[in-house]
Image (cartoon, rainbow, N blue to C red):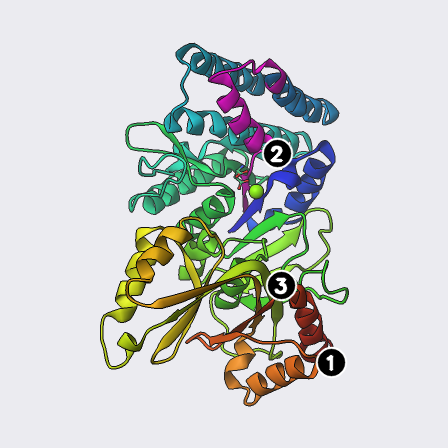
Amino acid sequence: MLVMKFGGTSVGSADAIRNLGKIVKKQLDKKPIVVASAVSKVTDLLIETSKLAAGDDYSQNLKKLKEKHQEIIKSLNLNIPEVNTLLAELEHQLNMIKNSRQLTAETLDLIQSCGERISVCIVAAHLQSIGINSKPYNAYDIGMITNSNFGEAEITLAAPVEINKKITSILKANAKKELHSAHVPVITGFIGKDKNGKITTLGRGGSDYSAAIIGAAINADEIQIWTDVSGVYSADPRIVKNARKIEKISFAECSELAYFGAKVLHPKTILPAMNKNIPVKVLNTFEPENSGTIILSEMKKSDEIVKALTCKKNITLININSTRMLFAYGFLARVFYVFDKYNISVDMISTSEVSMSLTIDKDMNLDKAVEELNQIATTNIVRNKAIVCVVGVGLKNETGIAGKIFSLMGQHKINVEMISQGASEINISFVVENDEAEKAVKLLHREFVEEYQ
Ligand code: ASP
Ligand code: MG
C-alpha cells in the first residue's frame, strides 16, 4: 500500500489537480491512499477571515474563499453539492464569530478544517471523473483521534489502531462492490477530532504529519509527499547555481538540514514513518518524472562525504565566561535554566572549562536573560552572525575533513568564530559574519560537492 500526500500547491489549481489525477492513475496497482491539504493559501485566508470576523467586515474574504474553490470546480467541469454545503457551514461559523465577537482556539480549528474538507471533495470528484473509483473522507471519521490541544493537537495512542481498522474496512467494503477497479480513499490532512468530538488541527503544515501517521498505521510500503519542488537539494539553488538534487538522504541528515532552512519537510512530521522504517519520497507534482528525493530512516554509508550545505543568517552569538565553571558542577544547568525560563531556544553550543558560546535565532526576552546570566558570569552578545552547516553521513568516516573545511575558510580569509560537531558526527557547523555566509557555502559546495564525483 502506498500513501500519496498532495500539498496545497498540488491541489491549488485545476491544472495541478489534473496532474494529481494522472499521478494517481499511474500507481493504481500499488493501492494508493491519497491525503490532501487545503487549496494553497486557503488556510492562511481562513485564519485571516476568522480574525476579521470577530471585529470587522469579512465579506470580501469570504467571497474570495468561495471564488477560489468554485473556479477550480468549474474548470474541472465538476458539480459538487457537498462543497456548497461546506461553504455554507463556513459562512454560518463566521457569522457566529461575528455575533459573539470572539474567536476561540476551538472555533479557529473548526474553521480551518473547512479548507481540507473542501479540497478532498474536489480531489475525489476529479478522480471519479477520470474513471478512478474514489471517495472523500474526513480524517476524524477514519480514526484520527487527537487530544484537545487546539491548533497543535497530538494523536492519541489509540489512533493508529483505529485508523488501521477503519481503512482496512473501507478498502474491503469497496473491493467487494467494484471488483475491477481500485478504490482510492482521499483523506483530509491536517485535521482530527478530540474525544469530545471537537475538530482539532495538527499544527501548520500538518498534512505531512497526517500522511505519516496514516502510512505508519497501515504499514504502507512507501509514503510519497507530492509538492512543488523536486526534492532536497545539496544547497539552496538561489545561492549555489550548481546545487543538485539529492537522491537519497537519511532522516538524521534531513533533520539537520530542516533546522537550517531547507523547508521541504519538518522532521517531526515524518517521524511516525521513520519509526516504522517506511521510506518517504519527496516528489514534484509539476515534474512527476523526476525521481525526487527518498528519505530513509537510517543510512550507514553514503557515497558522498558531504551531502548538503546550508546557512542560517542573522543569528545571535552569546559568549558566557566564568571562572566558577572550573571544577564546579551545576553551572551549565544554571545557564540553561535561565534560557528555559525566558523561552529562548538555543541552537548551537560549544564549551571550554571557563567559557561557553551559544547561538540563538530569536532575540525575544534576551535582555532579561542576560541580566540574570550576569549574576553568575560575564556575558557578551554579538549580533548579525551566520551559522554555516555541513551535513553528511560520510563525515563520520572521513579523516581530515574538518581540517579541509577550515583551511578552505582560512585561504579565503573567512573568519570562523565558533565550531561545533554534533555527537552524531554527521554535521559540522560554524559561525561566520553574516555577509560571508553565502561565500562560505559556495566555496564548500564547489570543493566538496561539485569537485567530488
Ligand atoms: N493546510 C494546512 C496548512 O496550510 C496544512 C498543510 O498544508 O499541510 O498549514
Ligand atoms: Mg503545506
Residue for point 67% across, 41% down: 20
Report, in whole angstroms, how far the alpha carbon at label 2 lies from the one at label 1: 40 Å
Where 113 sits versus 61, above or below? below
Residue 147, by quadrant, is top left
The amino acid on which the numbered mark 3 sits, given as a three-letter code, is Asn
Determine which residue is flagged by label 1: 451
Determine which residue is flagged by label 2: 41
- Along the viewing direction, whichever of 192 and 122 lies nearer the viewer: 192
- Along the viewing direction, whichever of 411 and 118 lies nearer the viewer: 411
Magenta region, residue range: 32-61
Q: Is residue 387 visible?
A: yes
Determine which residue is flagged by label 3: 434
Badge 3: few (under 14), some or many (20 or more) residues near its Cα, within 10 Å? some
Q: Is residue 78 visible?
A: no
Where 119 sits versus 338, above or below? above
View extreme (left): residue: 329
Badge 3 marks a residue whose secondary structure is: helix
Q: Earlier in the sequence, mark 3 or mark 1?
A: 3
The amino acid on which the numbered mark 1 sits, given as a three-letter code, is Glu
The amino acid on which the numbered mark 2 sits, given as a three-letter code, is Lys
Residue 129's x, y, as percent? 67, 29
Residue 418's x, y, as percent? 50, 74
- Are dots 3 and 2 in contact, CB under 8 Å? no
Q: Quadrant of the C terminus?
A: bottom right
